[in-house]
Amino acid sequence: MKDETLCLHAGYSPQNGEPRVVPIIQSTTYVYDNIEEVGEVFDDPTKSIIYSRFANPTVMAVEQKIAALEGGLAAMCTTSGQAAILIAILNLCKAGDSFISPIQIYGGATNLFAHTLKRLGIECIFVDCDADEDTLNKAFKPKTKAVFGESLSNPSLTVLDIEMYAKVAHAHNVPLIIDNTFATPVLCKPIDYGADIVVHSTSKYMDGHAVQVGGAIIDSGKFDWKNGNFPDMTDPDVTYHGISYTETYGNSAYIIKARMQLMRDYGVYPAAHSAFLLNVGLETLSIRMERYCQNAQKVAEYLNASDKIESVTYPGLTSDKYHVLAKKYLKGYSGVISCEIKGGRELAVQFINTLKLASIEVHVADIRTSVLHPASTTHRQLNAEQLFEAGISESLVRISVGLEHIDDILEDIHQALNSLS
Ligand code: PLP
């Protein structure tokens, strides 16, 4: 089925007399007729549900929808995008291991990789996202267990050459993990280009309405975990009755290990109510993405033509550095634009403060247009030199174009630009 249909129907097919909408099963626990049956579920938690720290019917319906949209085998939701990234990496790496990631990724992920995981003994080898095949190959160390990247990166809007990254990762017998948050499965399906694992912050476009923080991990089911590089997938897990994930669960080894071992121990499973809200957002994802792309393209072109603007970054512009890659990997260029206002920091701040319709928010992908000055907010701890290194100029403004009528969005930007002196 096509995305529009999957968004509405995947993961939940009500039977005669059952609720039309995915119901909220707000229950911590589940009952059984006898203790033997509970024991059986303990032996194999895929048989049923015992506790909402790692499985819940409402959340599982949404997991199936997200897996279907990404073309994956199975998915697991988490309490945030950060938790999804953390679990996705910890499912492969332990102290002494490393993984590779471009430096141009979401700042929260950079922190997690450069500092928190480092404290756990896991090294992130940072590369430039435009690294060529040779440079990527050379970045590998003997215990490198994964390659990570964002399909369309936040906030720099770089586009990853997913096929090339997958080719290199596979040549070293490790999986490629793609954070597909900004593109969403509607605009990009990383698994089709060789990605093995996909992660999401569902707090962004998937939700769209800014009503829940969440994440998801999707397993393509295609990676060969028996290649000798991943003993934790193949060898008996002493914490789970000595099972081997690959022997017992075959292609689902990765996602089942993530749930049975890591979700059990870290407990970052979303509440049913959050999953319900996410599902409502997902139902319209496909049609919303179409409009985000249309509106953002018009805003980017408008800004590009304005003499008050120094530069515009948006992969939908033919002049954009990533336009060619974006055309290959994306069905649309999503809704986030960054631009530099002529006149420096002061005018950038004045522009933002003068906008009337666009709200100032530390968020993107809201259905409402929002705007942010990274140098004063998300990156305010950086000095001018560090801002330069991070590719954030003092006059940079990030606009997340929403679904208001395009005339109203442009009129707002027009009046704010006109006020600049
Ligand atoms: N990945 C990307 C690309 C993001 O933009 C974000 C948040 O902005 C995250 C992950 C983290 O997601 P969350 O805020 O849901 O933890």
Image (cartoon, helix red, strand yellow):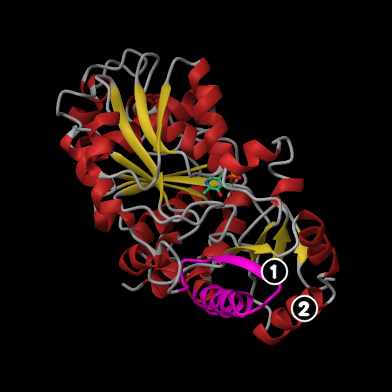
Dot 2, crowdedness within 10 Å: few (<14), some or many (≥20)? Answer: some
Quadrant placement of the C terminus = bottom right
With respect to residue 249, does 122 lie above or below? Answer: above
Q: To which residue does mark 2 refer? A: 412
Amino acid under label 2?
Asp
Residue 30 in view, yes or no: no
Dot 1, crowdedness within 10 Å: few (<14), some or many (≥20)? Answer: many
With respect to residue 45, does 343 lie above or below? Answer: below
Disc 2, SS:
helix
Q: Could you tell me residue 188's position as x and y percent?
A: 37, 62
Looking at the picture, tell me which residue is in the foreground, 104 or 275: 104
Closer to the chain start, of discs 1 and 2, is 1
Q: Which residues are magenta?
A: 290-317
With respect to residue 216, does 206 lie above or below? Answer: below
Classify residue 356 by image quadrant: bottom right
| Residue 319 circle label | none
Q: To which residue does mark 1 refer? A: 369
Separation of marks 1 and 2 at Cα, in angstroms: 10 Å
- Would residue 188 be found to the left or right of residue 336 on screen? left
Q: Could you tell me residue 290's position as x and y percent?
A: 49, 76
Circle 1/circle 2 CB separation < 8 Å:
yes
